[in-house]
Amino acid sequence: MADFKKIVEDNYDFLVETRKHFHRHPELSSQEFETAAFIKKHLDEWHIPYETTGVSDIVATIQGDSGGKTIALRGDIDALPITEATGVDFASQNPGVMHACGHDTHATFMLGAAKVLKDLKKEIRGTVKIIFQEGEEIGAGARKLLETNILDDVDSIVGIHNAADKDLGVFSLNYGVMSSYGSGVQLSIERDDAHKGNVLLAAADLVNTITTLTTQRVPGRDQAVLVPTVVKSENADCGLAKKVTIHLNFRTLDLADSKILDEVSDAVAAGIGSSHDVKVSVFHYEPGKAINNDKESTDRAVRVIERLYGKDAVQWGRPMMGGEDFSLYQEKIPGVFISLGGVTDGVYRPQHTDKTLVD
């Protein structure tokens, strides 16, 4: 049997330079044209077949011996609208765009996996599909890919995400819920042209009341967070705000709790509107699903990690309060999502910031 770790180590320089290339050339969600072109160039060089869909989704296929299961590996490839301030010599060359969530490393993981598994295809019993997914940051990538039939034959799917709060070489995962359920509302507060009501006061009252009632309804044993993410006002000619728009984001680890914000917002809106003499409209966003690791996929991942890197490499973690559209794959395909530590200097830099950096 081939030495998997040695083959990976032999490709180390290629992987480092590939990651730096992706980091220098980040592209926003569903605009990953050059990223996709770079990936396809290498797949073509290695004679690895692939299918494309959407703007820049790529699904490469490594076909081993007949029989066996079909396993998918998924990595996202999009970046964020952030100006980089890491100071590294491979910093973004695309002004105002940065790989601040580390999807440059995910794209590298997937391209490296394609290269290594191509060399090992004679030892693979079954099929491996490698997904380079667009648009994760806007929650659209997985859904669009699932609307095709490309993944219909997949038996299990594996997702991996670098972690800027864990040390290099730590694989963190757990059974069941791995991320939060998400819900959100957009609240629009308007007054009429007769200058009745003050929309700013109504908006403040609305946010405070919804926040108080929502958090009160969450059971004490449960974890949840409610955050206003956007507040915008529109002024009338007289200088008084005519309309205020507020976005509220609610995350919880319990499915039942995830419905609380919607219920409270609807109940509160009419009362606040009446008391402030304004019109309040509520728009409900589609709820976000939680990542949910099934036992068979998780056990398989743990066995592989321990065999390659030892038992100390596995860390049984807690669910994260963020969202991930990997959860959409798991509605149709059993799978496991893993966080991989990427911190080498003991400095934990939060993701989605201008200084996010992982190894």
Image (cartoon, rainbow, N blue to C red):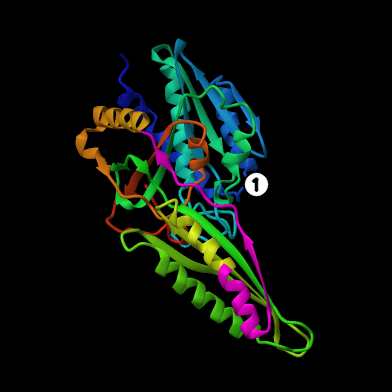
Magenta range: 267-294
Q: Locate the N terminus by quadrant.
A: top left
Residue at (64, 30) in percent of width and height: 148
Residue 192 falls left or right of residue 38: right
Instruction: Please tell me whether residue 306 is drawn above or below residue 211 in the rendered image.
Output: above
Q: Please, what secondary structure does the residue beneath circle 1 have?
A: loop
- Does 292 lie within the magenta span? yes
Q: Position of residue 79 (x, y in %)?
A: 55, 50
Q: Residues within 10 Å of mark 1 (few under 14, many from 20)?
A: some
Residue 310 falls left or right of residue 62: left
Q: How many marks?
A: 1
Residue 41 falls left or right of residue 304: right
* Whether residue 357 is visible: yes
- Nearer-the-camera pick, 203 or 273: 273
Instruction: Please tell me whether residue 101 is drawn above or below residue 77 in the rendered image.
Output: below
The amino acid pointed to by label 1 is Gln
- Nearer-the-camera pick, 186 or 316: 186
For label 1, the residue is 31
- Nearer-the-camera pick, 266 or 61: 266
- Nearer-the-camera pick, 209 or 62: 209
Q: Position of residue 153 (x, y in %)?
A: 54, 22
Q: Which quadrant of the figure has residue 67?
A: top left
Residue at (40, 61) in percent of width and height: 224
